[in-house]
Amino acid sequence: MIENTYAEALFKLAMKENSLQSMIEQFENFNDIAIDHPDWIVLLDTSSIRNKNKRQMLEELGVFDKAFVNFLMILIRNHDIKYYQDIYEQWIILSRREQKIAFVHLYTSKKLSSKQIERLRQEVQAFIPNMTIEFRIQIDSSLIEGIRMTYQGRSIERSLKRTIDDMKSNI
């Protein structure tokens, strides 16, 4: 997929230049700007503005170094800037793996206390050793009661909804 190709290219560049942390921060900044100003991506993708002017716009922000601007310009020239979110997601996977951070999506039926989160972190740590566990927590009212965790496409669910669904399938 195209997002993997771009993410891997940026990752290799960051490793070669020994600038992984800097690239992480710059891509996060770009992502935040794009989320706050979605029309900006449309502007960067339009063919009615010259690429020279688009480069100038990126440079004038003053938050991106030359290597990251060059990366963005490749996306712009290839009209792939619209895929930045997918590229960003793949980039996060690569960079966190290098930093030994496991990014786990945690869906809960209700807000969890810090003690509950820490207990879950310790449980997950047993399955993902030698990595720091970070949760992205999201409330999911369809769970009724309990949790669901996903990590790299694998899912664990301990919820009342899952129990009911299992009971229905056994009837």
Image (spheres, rainbow, N blue to C red):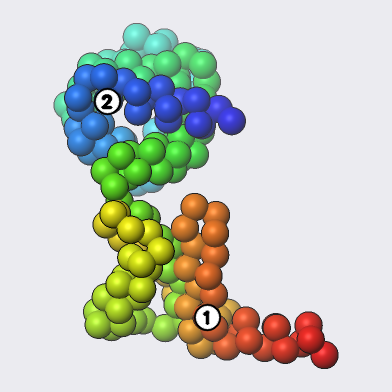
Marks 2/1 in contact by CB < 8 Å: the verdict is: no
Q: Nearer the viewer, residue 7 or 68?
A: 7
Position of residue 63 in the picture relative to residue 116 (left or right): left
Q: CA distance from mark 2 to mark 1?
A: 39 Å
Residue at the spot 30% in from the left edge and 72% down from the top edge: 122
- Locate the C terminus and report the quarter of the image it occupies: bottom right
Query: Which residue corresponds to mark 1?
Result: 158
Q: Earlier in the sequence, mark 2 or mark 1?
A: 2
Residue 59 on image: x %, y %: 23, 20
Task: Please tell me whether mark 2 sits on a helix, a strand or a loop.
Answer: helix
The answer to whether 124 is drawn above or below residue 168 in the figure is above
Image quadrant of residue 129? bottom left
Task: Please tell me whether mark 1 sits on a helix, a strand or a loop.
Answer: strand
Residue at the spot 20% in from the left edge and 27% down from the top edge: 19
Position of residue 107 in the picture relative to residue 19 (left or right): right
Residue at the spot 30% in from the left edge and 35% down from the top edge: 27
Query: Which residue corresponds to mark 2?
Result: 15
Query: Going by the picture, which residue comes out furthest to the right?
Result: 171
